[in-house]
Image: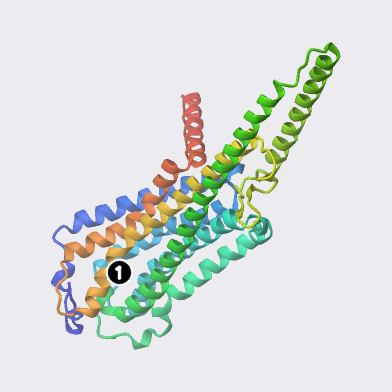
Amino acid sequence: MNVTPGSCTAEMPYGFQPRLKGLYIAAELFIAVLAMIGNVLVCLAVARNKRLRTVTNYFLVSLAVADILVGLLAIPCAVLTDLGQPRHDLPLCLVLLSILMVLTQSSILSLLAVAAERYMAILLPFQYQRVMSPRNAQVALMVTWGLGAITGTVPLMDWKRHPVNADYCIFTCVVDMSYMVYFNFFCCLLLPLVAMFVIYGHIFLTVRHQLKRIAMVSGTAKDVTTSGSGSTGTEVTGSSGTSTGAKVHARTGQEGDKDQKRKCDADVAGQETESGVMSSIETDTAAVFTKPGCRTDSGSAPQQSTVGKCKVSIRQELRKATSFFLVLFLFMLCWMPIHIINCILLFCPNCEVPMSATLATILLSHANSALNPILYAYRMRSFRRTLIGMWKGTWCVGLRHH
């Protein structure tokens, strides 16, 4: 697939005329339709279900919008440029090639914003409500799209330096591979990916530590309950007055425990919010914090129901973080091959890269936009239930019309 400056002129290079041109175009259009339909459904799900309108999902909607634009704009532009169009119009050619790079940068920055939001929610819960407010989320979204637009349009900023003898709009003819490798790949893709892997690694290790501490607290609660029930069995003596007093005392103690349990459960329920805010563990004081208002000190007898709720909540957050990590991992798998080919073209100019391999990696990178909604529906129960509800509602409306 290597293209020399001379091969970009006069006639279409042979390597850019795939034998299965119709199959490639059909695959691109199929991916574009799937990407638009799936991501539009994601946006509709968030719009219709108020419980999905969280800060986390705002960033997912931003990612979905980028994927919609990939299907609507980027894929048609990619098909045109893969066919060498437009000819003899370098500025327009660079605009078409930059669209996909802008959307890619916006997607990776949206994923980075999701990772940072999950880090705040799980490890810094008491600062979460102040830092991750809806207003700040909107600012973060504007920043991600602004940075994506700037980094993706770098080739347009000095377009006069690009080769003017490129008659065909071929990516490797008009875009400098040094920019694609050193700036677009190393700086704008690898660095955010490494940062996100570090963030999720820290989250998983901390949550694992939290679950171990809660298990220890739960075991302490069982021991205290068992010893307490054993000691109450020896309180009764032969005196009827003492027996009556013990019964009254036991009944009063049970009512007090029930009231305390109700109060604790109410506090826990009152603090559970849509964003799934959790907190960290203070190892110095040996106190376990799992949600604001859900505190279990090692020196007191914790309630089993409270500890159970906190454990369930942590597991829910762990599942949510795992789902977002899978979205990130899928993004990396889909986009890494095309960047590896760019590295080969830069560092090994004499190495031949088959055109079929290049087209396959291009299709894989575009397919990422269509796969994200499937992952949301499979991994995230709230999205799945909302989408099923929307489908059932549409089906019922259709039956009524018939």
Please state which amino acid type lies under the numbered disc 1.
His
Disc 1 is placed on an element classified as helix
The quadrant where residue 355 appears: bottom left
Give the residue pinned by disc 1. 339
Q: Residue at x 15, y 70 (%)?
A: 15
Asked if residue 337 can be seen in this view, the reply is yes
Of 236 and 222, which appears nearest the observer?
A: 236
Q: Residue furthest front?
A: 238
Q: Is residue 67 above or below residue 319?
A: below
Q: Is residue 82 above or below residue 348?
A: above
Q: Position of residue 287 (x, y in %)?
A: 65, 50
Asked if residue 170 can be seen in this view, the reply is no
User: What sort of colour scheme is used for the picture?
Assistant: rainbow
The quadrant where residue 91 appears: bottom left
Q: Viewed as shown, does residue 396 lie left or right of 263?
A: left
Q: Position of residue 93 (x, y in %)?
A: 34, 74
Of 232 and 119, which appears nearest the observer?
A: 232
The quadrant where residue 314 appears: top right
Of 151 and 312, which appears nearest the observer?
A: 312
Q: Residue furthest bottom?
A: 161
Q: Position of residue 254 (x, y in %)?
A: 75, 25
Point out the image quarter for the N terminus.
Answer: bottom left
Q: How many marks?
A: 1
Q: Position of residue 144 (x, y in %)?
A: 52, 67
Q: Residue at x 51, y 31 (%)?
A: 393
Check disc 1: other Cα within 10 Å, few if <14, some if 14-19, many if 20+: some
Q: Viewed as shown, does residue 47 lie left or right of 199?
A: right
